[in-house]
Image: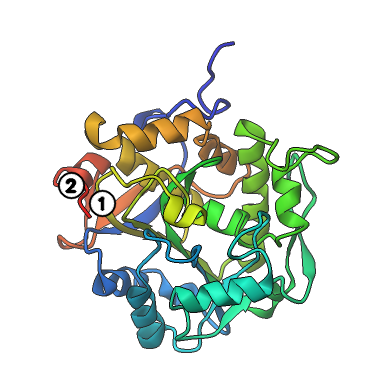
Amino acid sequence: MEKVPGKNGEVYIPYDKREGAKSVVYFTRDLSSAGLKKIYEKISSVLEGKIAIKLHTGEKHGPNIIPRPWVETLIKDEIPNGTIVETNTYYEGDRYTTEDHRETLKVNGWTFCPVDIMDEDGTVDLEVKGGKWFDHMTMGKNITNYDSLLVLTHFKGHTQGGFGGSAKNIGIGCADGRIGKKMIHTTPGSPDMWDIRKEEFMERMMESAKAVVDHFDPHIAFINVMRNMSVSCDCEGTAAAPVVTPNVGILASLDILAIDQASVDLVYAMKEEDHHALVERMESRHGLRQLTYMKELGMGNDLYTLIDLDHDEVEIDAKEAVKDVVPFTE
């Protein structure tokens, strides 16, 4: 069967082959709490009222999650009334029940601010507008308690999704652990809870993400931290594959497609020996369908202006951004 760019998620579409409007994506190489605060300030103006912060808090002792001290500094200095939000997992593990999830939060040090496990007390259905698979997605009920959402994402690979960016963070991470996540992962009646894969899985996940974006619009902003990028998701904890991809930096945008597309572009812009593992993971799972389906759903732009915060806020391209990356070391 012919591989069609856009429809087949193993086909990467180069920047110069895309069309449409441009969004702004900010970039810093400063992987630190100071870098995180600096880039947050560029997108924080849309966040108001009661602010939720969606991040992957990880399985117990997960080695690659966003460093807790960075998040603690950001919240204490910039979002003092913010609440970290999560949901329970679909798989049995350290975060399967609310009781186990709260114990895991303590082990990983997420104790410096409130953490709301949004499906602890039930679910709510959010509308999916223009979806192919869903007309609604079932989310943790408490998502409706917030006025704004900061999507704070550790960008990395993913065993089933190919990669996990901002869209995966909310598409899977806001769906409740028993109903919503099952809607995305499992064909009704199937004995295999993970039987939905490749293009269909990406499309279902993006429709779930769209429900979250539309619910909070325009009070939603996105940050991707490109550090410790294993091909494994943080849900694999200490079993995650060793990191071999160089660290890059931190990105921020008000456009979910633009930030995930820019993150993928930065990976592809590396030397082949540096990006081989992560590119293979993306393409073998058909993860690039996340990006083209977001565009089809009208979730944002795959063209963007990349603004370098480290050098007088000049516009740069992906190759310029990654030209000085060095091989990953522990």
Tag of residue 104: none
Residue that carries the numbered disc 1 in the rendered image: 247
* Residue at 37%, 55% in the rendered image: 24
Near mark 1 (Cα within 10 A), the count class, few <14, some 14-19 or many ≥20, is many
Asked whether residue 86 is in view, the answer is yes
Quadrant of the image containing the N terminus: top right
Secondary element at tag 1: loop
Residue that carries the numbered disc 2 in the rendered image: 325
* Residue at 61%, 54% in the rendered image: 171
Measure how far apart labels 2 and 1 are at the Cα level.
7 Å
Is the residue under label 1 in contact with that under label 2 (CB below 8 Å)?
yes
Look at the picture and state if 36 lies above or below 17. below
**Rendered location of residue 47, percent (x, y):** 50, 76
Q: Quadrant of residue 293?
A: top right
In front of the other: 319 or 63 = 63
145 left or right of 53?
Answer: right
- Residue extending farthest right: 189
Q: Quadrant of residue 267?
A: top left
**Rendered location of residue 148, percent (x, y):** 57, 75
325 left or right of 190?
Answer: left
Look at the picture and state if 102 lies above or below 31. below
Near mark 2 (Cα within 10 A), the count class, few <14, some 14-19 or many ≥20, is some
**Rendered location of residue 111, percent (x, y):** 47, 84
